[in-house]
Amino acid sequence: MSIPESTIQKVLNSVDIVEVIGESVRLTKAGRNFKARCPFHNEKTPSFMVSTEKQIFHCFGCNVGGNAISFVMKMEGLTYPEAIKKLAQKCGIEIKEEYSGKDAGQPQEREIIFKILEETAVFYQQFFDRDKIAKNWVKKRGISEDTIKKFRIGYAPASSKTLLNAAIKKGYSRELLQKAGVVSSDKDFFYNRIIFPIFDITGRVVAFGGRVLDDPPQRTLPKYINSPETSVYSKSRVLYGLNFAGKVIRDEGSAVILEGYIDVVMCHQFGFKNTVATLGTAFTQQHSSVLKRYTDNVVIAYDADNAGRSSALRSCDVLLADDLHVRVAQLPDGKDSDEILLSGGPDKLKTVFSNAKSYIDFLIDWKSGSFDPGTIEGKRDIAKIVLPVISKIPNAIVKSEYIKMLSERFGIKEEILNSEMAKIKPVFPRPASTDGIITKKNVSLAEHNLISVLIKDLKLIDSLPDFVQEDFNSPEIKKIFDLLLKLRKNGTASVKPSELVEMLGSDYVTQILMDDDGITDSDRFIKSYREAVLFNRDKRKLERLKKEDLSEFIKISKKIKGSKK
């Protein structure tokens, strides 16, 4: 399977990379370019640059670079064809795939899994529309028709093989259905449950969550179950509702993390559209990294019971270590956010979110109930709990302000608190994965500048000797030069940066393209480079002849001696 080259170039010429990257990364203007903190590795100072003019990006911290297609692939975990299709859809360009050889007519397994998941979502929606009990259950929870359609809420029928039989009848194998996570070995994974499709940030269905219809005391099954992890779904990376909330989070400058699907569904229905939830798992560093692309400000809203507090604390620790500003909103009377909305309206929940306390304040308030802060022992015990948390904060200013607050609140000198904190053995967060990240290439400045100059004007290659590649120290430079030479021999006089990146598949070329070589006279640079190449060639020949032909050695030696080089 392949997508025609002309279509790929049309897509690259139609999209704006700043708009594409800006949908998932907060960009700020930096001269002619835009900058941000890199979404592919943890960093405090922005080193991720995006060029409107060249339609490329490059991170000078981890050396990842590319064009709009490669960004979407890296950011959203898409295959090459999937990334092109997404961008093409954005531009209104029709994709006509070409199949050849043994692959003719055979979509890849990943695409089939997405197709199964989409058709399963439709299957559940159709059963929901026909089932009065399921519809009444959702109606009692206050979920509107518009919200049902937006979140594509469905119903898995009570019979445990309805989906399995229907899917096999359509020609899907049990093996692929299991790989998609919609069936177990011999039955449907979900049955007699309200279904909440789980979407990736592009809006594709990647998994499902199921909620039982009956409530205690009759209920014997788990209240919620989620799809197993698959090749397209990882619960430690996906946040429920982020496909709807991402833009709002960026616009409003904050995100609210809730506990479950219904909380998110109802909050969006009542206008709190910056809300998301984890999916039956603890909040992870990957979740934090995803949120950090949209905002630095996060509110955690969990139940007020001990389990809810403990869950909030674990989430806060992860977010705090990732240098995000974290606050905790305590839900009153043990109610979920959806219950607050139904009983007190949106103003009540807005007040709860607005009154959220900083994580450190929340932690102190909670633990102060167990210790007497008026005693030496109480101060010691509270400090033993709070100082390890403060020590994890990467930002020195924020850390200092929390120490100051702790000092004022409990009457302990700041220097004493800092002294105690210094005794704490630091726990460094596990670094983000560097899979696919390249290190800086060992390239000479002259070679770097040569490629930079040639990219701007391919006709300059005509002035270089045919054997120029022999002097390259870097295989990466040779790879780039060989492509430029091929383009020139085919009559090409210029090439767009985004197209060059597409042809090479190289991260390093984006660094060259983003760098300012400072060369104002390209012809003069090429002339000097040519002279240097010829000089080095003579030197190598001289070394060889010194051993083989003395007369020729003397001849070339005199030539070099008279050279300005």
Image (tube, helix red, strand yellow):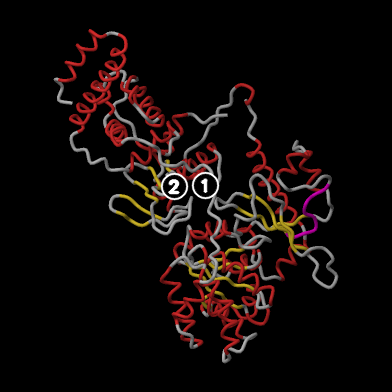
Residue 283: % across, % down: 61, 62
On the rendered structure, is 374 left or right of 530? right
Span shown in magenta: 187-194
Residue position marked by numbered label 1 in the rendering: 434
On the rendered structure, is 517 left or right of 151? left
Q: Quadrant of the C terminus?
A: top left
The answer to whether residue 376 shows anywhere in this view is yes
Q: Are marks 2 and 1 in contact (CB under 8 Å)?
A: yes
Q: Which residue sits at x=27%, y=24%?
A: 461
Residue 143: % across, % down: 66, 67
Determine if the magenta segment contains residue 191: yes
On the rendered structure, is 355 left or right of 11? right
Q: Quadrant of the N terminus?
A: top right
Could you tell me what secondary structure mostly forms the magenta stretch?
A: loop
The answer to whether residue 346 shows anywhere in this view is no
Residue 146: % across, % down: 61, 62
- Residue in the foreground of this view, choosing between 298 and 465: 465
**Relative to 132, is 202 above or below?**
above
Q: How many marks?
A: 2
Residue 237: % across, % down: 60, 54
- Residue in the foreground of this view, choosing between 436 and 498: 436
Q: Give the mark nearest the N terminus, 2 or 1.
A: 2
Q: Which residue sits at x=44%, y=72%?
A: 398
Give SS at disc 2.
loop
Q: Amino acid at mark 2?
A: Cys
Q: Amino acid at mark 1?
A: Thr
Query: What is the CA distance from the residue labelled 2 to the residue labelled 1?
Result: 8 Å
Residue position marked by numbered label 2 in the rendering: 62
**Relative to 157, is 356 above or below?**
below
Give SS at disc 1.
loop
